[in-house]
Image: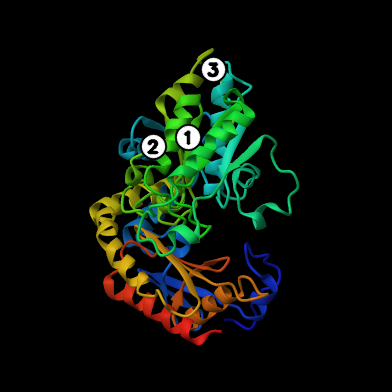
Amino acid sequence: MSSALNLEPYWMPFTSNRFFKANPLLMASAKGMYFTTTDGKKILDGIAGLWCCNAGHCHPKIVAAIQTQVATLDYATAFQLGHPGVFELADRLTQMAPGNLDHAFFVNSGSEAVDTALKIAIAYHRVRGEGQRIRLIGRERGYHGVGFGGISVGGMSPNRKMYGALLPGIDHLPHTHDLAHNAFSRGMPEWGAHLADELENIVALHDASTIAAVIVEPVAGSAGVLVPAPKYLQRLREICDRHGILLIFDEVITAFGRTGSRFGAETFGVQPDLIALAKGLTSGAIPMGAVLVDKDIYSAFMTGPEHSVEFFHGYTYSGHPAAVAAGLASLSVYEEEGLYQRASEMAPVLEDAVHSLKGAPHVIDIRNIGMMAAIELEPRPGEPTMRATEMFRRCFEAGLLIRTTGDVLALSPPLIIDADQIGQIVDTIGKALQSIK
């Protein structure tokens, strides 16, 4: 690190700024499965950047596509104009999407995708003459980004507590994880499908005629890989159908191979009305998100004079040419290199490896699905989160990047990972567990 580099002006996100700036960890480059720090140390990436670099880092086809695009068309407004690439990307996404999700609305992040999906849901009911349907139902321990809509339907207390009452008309389902019933489950736990029936109680409380949508992650990622029981998501779908409520899947993390399929909706066999996407859409190379929308929802907006704007929403950088180029290249790489199939094939390897840590010091649960895994640690008495924070530092010192959330260690490696690298991840974690108190 250059001695002239001033760390102070940058207010870092989701970071203990004072500690970091006294003990900085700085990346200089990345390639494939590895980062390289500013002092030349290689770091095995156990979390795909931040659940996003599914094709690995600096994939040459993605890099080349971005470079060519920026040199050709750096920007094109998304309002009343377009460029060919954005229509191609929408077509490719909707062709691969499950069911009748045949329209794509482009945004710039997962947070924007969620807020857009929530706005579409509320507006959809309004254009159909049911404008009283404004209530949104999220889930405890859910993470839906950091917009006011996302933190309102989200259920992670630290993300909510600073910001007052948030949006009105929000309620929450209980989360799906209970250590007493499903600790150390491999894949989907047997217990918990009945928790979906709590939606009926919420409907009874507020009346279905006031509820616009339910939003859940197929797997709650940022809360620590909380995997639903079989039939849980199916029950949510059935209840939503019974009461005319839209079902939104937040697949910002789970899409593009993370669960072993192109979409979590495919893995779990449940068809949502909208899907929020980001992260793996561009393999992390350029910020981008999208909302996939059922054809009947889109069609409901296409009324009135042909020249009128049907949906007053969008962003300066919606469908940005460089992001589109990254998205098109990423989708091609996923298909050409068989990364969805590879994720499915490597999932049992990751499962066996992480579950080998059962019985290691401080470990109270291990859970996994697809190329996602979590190792939950017993909180240190009087110091919640500190044991996991220490593990993060110990692993980094040993050449491994992991993610911590509370006292959970989360893993979501690039889909290009091999068995030896999975072994290295688990071996490094195991040694670090032996070294901490």
Relative image position of residue 306 (x, y in whole percent):
50, 15
User: In which image quadrant can residue 430 be found?
Assistant: bottom left
In the rendered view, tell whether residue 77 sits above or below residue 392. Answer: above
User: Residue placed farthest to the bottom in the image?
Assistant: 435
236 or 258, nearer to the observer: 236
The residue located at (49%, 51%) in the rendering is 176
User: In which image quadrant can residue 2 be found?
Assistant: bottom right
User: In which image quadrant can residue 387 be found?
Assistant: bottom right
- Crowding at label 1, few (<14), some or many (≥20) Cα neighbours within 10 Å? many
- Crowding at label 2, few (<14), some or many (≥20) Cα neighbours within 10 Å? many
247 or 109, nearer to the observer: 247
Q: Amino acid at mark 2?
A: Ala
Residue on which the image places disc 2:
90
- Crowding at label 3, few (<14), some or many (≥20) Cα neighbours within 10 Å? few
In the rendered view, tell whether residue 291 sits above or below residue 346. Answer: above
Relative image position of residue 126 (x, y in whole percent):
59, 21
In the rendered view, tell whether residue 361 sits above or below residue 15. Answer: below
User: Residue placed farthest to the right in the image?
Assistant: 164
Residue on which the image places disc 1:
247
Residue on which the image places disc 3:
128
* Secondary element at image label 2: helix
Residue 307 shows up from this direction: yes
Label 1 with label 3: CB-CB less than 8 Å = no
370 or 74, nearer to the observer: 370
Q: Mark 2 and mark 3: span between their CA atoms?
A: 25 Å
Q: Mark 2 and mark 1: span between their CA atoms?
A: 21 Å
Q: How many marks?
A: 3
